[in-house]
Amino acid sequence: MTTAVITGANRGIGLAFAKALLARGDTVIGTAREPAEAGELANSGAEVEELDVTDDASVTNFAERLQGRSVDLLINNAGILRRDRLDSFDPATLQREFDVNALGPLRVTNALLPSLRLSAKPRIVALTSRMGSIADNNSGGFYGYRASKAALNAVIKSLSIDLDPWPAVVIHPGYVRTRMTGNQGDLTAEEAVERMLLVIDKLDSSMSGKFFHRDGHELPW
């Protein structure tokens, strides 16, 4: 049985991951900035923990609460999207996206290393976006989101080297109908998670440091 930690698990893709893993018998520790507002997550049977991935003290306290527990799968899912343009971007908003989308997963992964080391098969996953691909950018805009996801990709690539042979990968879930996308997209969170779990379940050291589409093929950096 796998013990999984999922950040930002109170809604959207994170909640869908929690429900899918619980349905197959795994233990799920789902995090939310406001646990009192994570009723659906709590009712699913997941353990609910308070965590703000941008707050060092919050991350440290969360890791301390898990001290002595093995974590087999870490899914860095928490993220934000702001629709900025060249003529309207706010530097403070861009910094916030970097803090959540890129530095957050690094903080959490580093803090949970003692629990990951207790696992016989630790795996680290971060949800990125095709918009973080430099080679695939042919439409511009979205400066904070694109740049923060590109930074996240670089973070996970470095983690894959520093934590070798643990698998550490980034996965693009696709255009998913969630609150973040204004409920626009080509598939539901449940459908996206079903496909991503097929990739996650076969992760090994040969796949580490790679950028995967939800359907399993590699994407350009």
Image: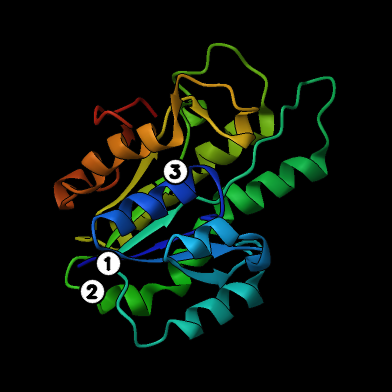
Up the image or down, 136 lies above or below 14; here it is above
Report helix, strand or loop for mark 1.
loop
**CA separation, marks 2 and 1?**
5 Å
> Which residue does the numbered mark 2 point to in the structure image?
119
**Is residue 157 found left or right of 142 in the rendered image?**
left
Along the polypeptide, which appears first: circle 2 or circle 3? 2
SS state under label 2: loop
Q: In which image quadrant can residue 50 be found? A: bottom right
Determine the residue positioned at 20% across, 44% down.
207
Q: Is residue 95 above or below residue 61?
A: above
| Residue 74, horizontal then vertical, whole percent | 37, 60
* Mark 3 and mark 1: Cα distance apart in space: 17 Å
Marks 2 and 1 close (CB-CB < 8 Å): yes
Residue 166, quarter of the rendered image: bottom left
Viewer-side residue, 169 vs 160: 169
Residue receiving disc 1: 72
The crowd level at tag 2 (other Cα within 10 Å; few <14, some 14-19, many 20+) is: some
How many neighbours does mark 3 have within 10 angstroms: few (below 14), some (14-19), or many (20 or more)?
many
Instruction: Determine which residue is flagged by label 3.
Output: 127
Q: Residue 94, position in %: x, y?
A: 73, 40
Q: Is residue 80 positioned above or below 142 on the image?
A: below
Q: State the CA–CA distance, disc 2 to disc 3.
A: 21 Å
- Closer to the camera in the image, 53 or 190: 190
Q: Which residue is rendered at x = 67% and y = 67% of the image? A: 36
